[in-house]
Image (cartoon, rainbow, N blue to C red):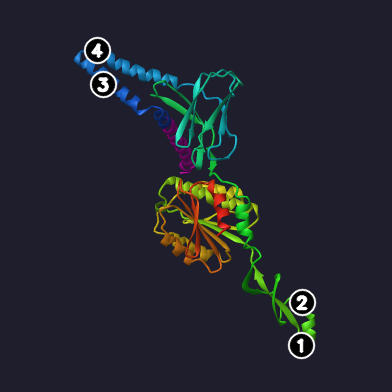
Amino acid sequence: MSTTQASTPETTRSVTRTVTQLVGQVRRTTQALSWVSRAAWVLLALGVVGLVAGRMLGWVELVVLGAGFTATVMVAAIFAIGRHPYAIGLRLREGRVVVGERAMGGVDVRNVGDRPVLPARIELPVGGSRASFALPALAPAEVHDELFVIPTARRGVITVGPVSSVRGDPLGLVRRSVLWTDPEELYVHPRTVRMGSSAAGFLHDLEGQETRDVTNADLSFHALREYGPGDDRRYVHWRSSARTGTLMVRQFEETRRSHMVVAMSSQERDYGDPEEFELVISALGSLGLEAIHASKDLTAMASHGVISSTTPRRLLDDLTRLESVHSPNTLVDLARAVTRDVQRATVVVLLCGSEVGPREIRAAGAVLPLGVRSLAIQARIGAESTVRRLGQVTTLTLGSLEDLPRGFRKLERV
């Protein structure tokens, strides 16, 4: 009994070791089989069938053809044999560029082995495409540097990498690849323009104006009232207190600091052309950057929710990832969200495409809070920049991004 009990743990370890070895062997075999393409398997199958059928039927031509197919696959497998003694690094010259700017990247390959290595190939996914570079034979410690250009014609986040080294035959029948790096992201930011004094004047006109809200501390004097518990003694009006025999404190009308809300429709149906959607994103980014640089309070929104606007980089990063959506929400629903979520807004800019009608813009302005200066920017590619009133909303038709500062100068005259 004791001998059996002593041998049980050792037997269990032996079985575990055997199972681990079998699993490792199966994994290595599966990985090796994955190097062989579907075309190679078909060619190998045709070769075997040709050899067997040729021998059975006595057709020398069929035997030769089968032998040729089989030999082709075998020779292709030889190309995949070889070491990958590399140290490979991926670098991007910058992680953020503007649409149309030149974006460069590089791949550094170093032979870390103690013997020369045969030529190979480097493959690099760039967005939806794949770049391929020929890697020459490298002596020990030799470094090869390959530069590449990343297309930036469209706004978006481009995933670059991972880099892989590939060995295989010229026909692509058998290929063996090894991944070396993690993928990196390149942000292609939307184009923006400097607003200059145009938007600055639009915001400064509102700052410092009094509201009807009464507060205990501000700049604009409103009235006197009796002192109450918790009132700041600095605002006691001593002359009135001496005359009435009761402590009197000052009340003020609250002045408002401009809080700008830029809210864009991200509904695909609101845009007659994809370029209108890009124009609206660029206009929102331009207004948002102007407000941030002027240290104004800013809230950026889209139909799907809030856009981060704490810093210029976070604003542009969020706009870079923004895509159009399909939902039943309208521009009026977006205006309701502004009214509900931004209590102290003083300027609201609604941005939309050419498919939004005047009635919907007028209805969106009607649900905004009273006393808020409301503006609608409607993108219409190629149209002349015009300004008109639609109910409570001043509407600016925007034909190009360069028209945005000129359009705001027109607003000053309305």
Q: Earlier in the sequence, mark 4 or mark 2?
A: 4
Residue 238 horizontal/vertical position (percent): 79, 81
Residue 316 located left or right of residue 250: left
Q: Earlier in the sequence, mark 3 or mark 1?
A: 3
**Is residue 308 in sight in this rendering?**
no
Say whether residue 9 is magenta: yes
Q: Point out the stretch of residues depicted in magenta.
A: 1-28
Question: CA–CA distance between discs 3 and 1?
Answer: 116 Å
Q: Earlier in the sequence, mark 1 or mark 2?
A: 2
Label 1 packing within 10 angstroms: few (<14), some (14-19), many (20+):
few
Where residue 49 is drawn, which disc sits there? 3
- For the point 65% across and 54% down, the residue is 294
Residue 32 horizontal/vertical position (percent): 42, 28
Q: Earlier in the sequence, mark 2 or mark 3?
A: 3
Badge 4 is on which residue?
Answer: 61
> Which residue lies most toward the front here?
413
Residue 351 located left or right of residue 204: left
Where residue 18 is drawn, which disc sits there? none
Badge 1 is on which residue?
Answer: 244
Residue 221 located left or right of residue 10: right
Instruction: Please tell me whether mark 4 sits on a helix, a strand or a loop.
Output: helix
Question: CA–CA distance between discs 1 and 2?
Answer: 17 Å
Say what amino acid the circle numbered 1 marks: Thr
Question: CA–CA distance between discs 3 and 4?
Answer: 13 Å
Instruction: Please tell me whether mark 2 sits on a helix, a strand or a loop.
Output: helix
Q: Earlier in the sequence, mark 3 or mark 4?
A: 3
Asked whether disc 4 touches disc 2, contact meaning CB atoms under 8 Å apart, the reply is no
Say what amino acid the circle numbered 2 marks: Arg
Report which quarter residue 256 is drawn in. bottom right
Badge 2 is on which residue?
Answer: 233
> Which residue lies most toward the top here?
60
